[in-house]
């Protein structure tokens, strides 16, 4: 096909496709917009709501036992045990204060007055040519109610 014939065919195709004239649209009356009603709030019966234990922790006993990893005994914590009745533990990094409180109360049968938590970052160490890093740990300082004590050795022997 020659270029002249191609142009003629193209012009013929475009001429055949003509747009139909637009029909006159009737004017649309403007009406006030009605605001949609807010969705009704779902009412939950207190009986159906999920229940949390009284101590604030939502973990089962099996999970609570795994919260405390080991007692953290140093000179500083030994003095704190004598002076302020505060015991320190290494705990899991994902544990919360209510979890720690519930775990101590469950494992040692004592009343906990308060819990303070310290996130300790790992130190960088050198292994020959390679640089390494020790693990991050989380420590919990647990203050017991007056008159309560924890005997670590009695729990280990039992």
Image: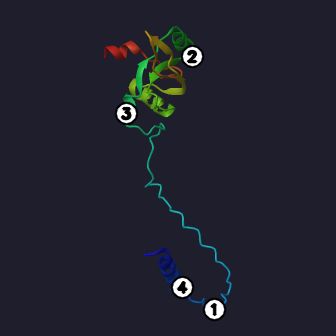
In the rendered image, residue 134, in percent from the top left (x then y), is placed at 46, 18
Image quadrant in which you'd find residue 28? bottom right
Crowding at label 1, few (<14), some or many (≥20) Cα neighbours within 10 Å? few
Tag 1–tag 3 contact (CB < 8 Å): no
Taking the spot 39% from the left edge, 31% from the top edge, the residue there is 64
Please tell me whether residue 4 is drawn above or below residue 73 in the rendered image.
below
Alpha carbon separation for disc pair 4 and 1: 24 Å
Pick whichever of labels 2 and 3 is earlier in the sequence: 3
Tag 2–tag 1 contact (CB < 8 Å): no
Tell me the number on the disc at residue 63: 3
In the rendered image, residue 149, in percent from the top left (x then y), is placed at 47, 18
Element at badge 3? helix
Taking the spot 59% from the left edge, 72% from the top edge, the residue there is 37
The answer to whether 112 appears left or right of 36 in the picture is left
Pick whichever of labels 4 and 3 is earlier in the sequence: 4
Query: Residue pushed farthest left?
Result: 158
Between marks 2 and 3 in the image, the one whose residue lies nearer the viewer: 3
Pick whichever of labels 1 and 3 is earlier in the sequence: 1
Pick whichever of labels 4 and 1 is earlier in the sequence: 4
- Position of the N terminus by quadrant: bottom left
Alpha carbon separation for disc pair 4 and 3: 80 Å
Alpha carbon separation for disc pair 1 and 3: 74 Å
Query: Mark 4 highlights which residue?
Result: 15
Query: Mark 2 highlights which residue?
Result: 84
């Amino acid at each position: 096909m020659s270029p002249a014939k191609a142009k003629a065919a193209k012009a013929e195709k475009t001429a055949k496709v003509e747009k139909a004239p637009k029909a006159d649209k009737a004017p649309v009356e403007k009406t006030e917009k009605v605001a949609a009603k807010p969705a009704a709030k779902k009412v939950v019966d207190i009986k159906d709501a999920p229940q949390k234990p009284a101590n604030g922790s939502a973990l089962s006993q099996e999970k609570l036992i795994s919260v405390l990893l080991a007692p953290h005994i140093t000179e500083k914590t030994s003095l704190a045990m004598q002076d302020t009745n505060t015991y320190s533990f290494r705990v899991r990094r994902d544990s919360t204060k209510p979890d720690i409180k519930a775990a101590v109360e469950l494992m040692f049968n004592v009343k906990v007055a308060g819990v303070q938590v310290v996130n300790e970052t790992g130190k960088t160490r050198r292994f020959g040519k390679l640089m390494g890093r020790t693990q991050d740990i989380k420590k919990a300082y647990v203050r017991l109610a007056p008159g309560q004590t924890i005997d670590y050795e009695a729990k280990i022997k039992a």
